[in-house]
Structure formats: structure tokens, C-alpha cells
Image (spheres, rainbow, N blue to C red):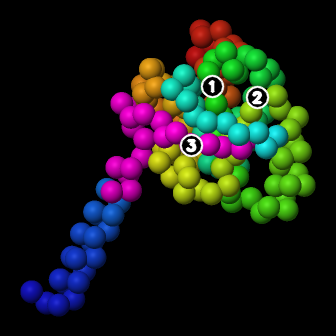
Amino acid sequence: MPKRLVILLTALLSLTLYSSLCSADRLKPGDRLARLEFQDQFDHPHNLEDQTNLVFFAKSKQAGSLMTNILADVSADRFSKLNAVFISDISGIPSLVTRLFVLPEMRDIEPPILLVREPEKVAWLPREEEKVTVIKLAGGKVDHISFTDDEVTLKTILGLLPTDSL
């Protein structure tokens, strides 16, 4: 077998193994949430706990904006009663922009927004480009994972709309 072909096959095999290992590390139904601490938009610490029933995760600016717009109409008490958390990855935003614009906007929102400043901290969370990840939990374990960019769907999940709106 020619040397170039062996190198090419080895590289392809390595890439395949690497991609399967990366995807295997992502959260899936049946898994428990990692116990991590996050700071919210008010610099208060929060932990993911076994009582958490619902996790919303936004990796992109579009998904984050969608969630923050919806949460602007949700009280902290209502969000807490749902045992819900919203995790927003702001790691790609320059720190000056975060300090001057992003955090002041987020501080107008009552429910805590758990902030990710190091993307590797949430590399295990599943995501789809430009969509909000919705993770439903039961007894501390992942029951269902979905992805949406639909405002009506997110508002229905939060109980802001009747379920027959879907």
C-alpha cells in the first residue's frame, strides 16, 4: 500500500475516533447534570442541582437574545417555581462589550442568567447552531433534549402560553 494512502487512512481514522469521542462526551438522556457553579448577571453564585427540572442553554447571540427577550416578561419567582435555569454562553463577546452593554441589559431581567465565560465549562451541553437547547430533567437525570428557535414553543414550555398553542 502506498505510504500516502496509509497516512490518509490513518488521518481519517483518527478524525473519526476524535469526533465520536467528542460527541460521546455530550449530555444525553439518562445522564445526570454536572455539578458546576456559575455566576449570574448580578455576580451571585448558582449551582446546578438535582431539583433542577428545566435547563435552557444558549450558545449563540441569536439564541441568547431570544431567551432574554422572553425572560424579560418572567418573574424570578415563577422561574424558580419551575426549577428552571438559563445558561448563556457569553464567552465569545469581548469583555468591554459585556461590561458596557450585555450585563446592564441582563440586569433588567429578574430570573438569574447563569453566565459562561469559559466555553470548555459547558462543552458537554448539546447544542444546535442558533437554537436554544431545552433539557428536561426528572429526578436529577436528563429525560429529554430538544432544540428550538421558536418563541411560542419556549413561552409554552415556560407556561406563558396555553399548551394548545403548539
Closer to the observer: label 3 or label 1? 3
Q: Residue at x 64, y 40 (%)?
A: 87
Crowd rating for badge 3 (residues with CA inside 10 Å; few <14, some 14–19, many 20+): few
In the rendered structure, find residue 84 and report the number of the disc placed on it: 1
- Residue flagged by tag 2: what amino acid is it? Pro
Mark 2, residue position? 111
The quadrant in which residue 72 appears is top right
Q: Is residue 88 visible?
A: no
Classify 10 Å Cα crowding around label 1: few (below 14), some (14-19), many (20 and above).
Answer: many
User: Distance between the Cα atoms at labels 1 and 2?
Assistant: 9 Å
Which residue bears the numbered disc 3?
A: 36
Quick one: 69 or 78, which is closer to the camera?
78
Which quadrant is home to the N terminus?
A: bottom left
Which one is in front in this view, the residue at disc 3 or the one at disc 2? 3
Q: Is residue 75 above or below residue 60?
A: above
Residue numbers of the magenta segment? 21-40
Magenta span: predominant SS is loop
Q: Are marks 1 and 2 in contact (CB under 8 Å)?
A: yes
Q: Is residue 144 above or below residue 166?
A: below
Residue 44: image location, x then y, percent: 76, 39
Q: Looking at the image, which is closer to me, 74 or 99?
A: 99
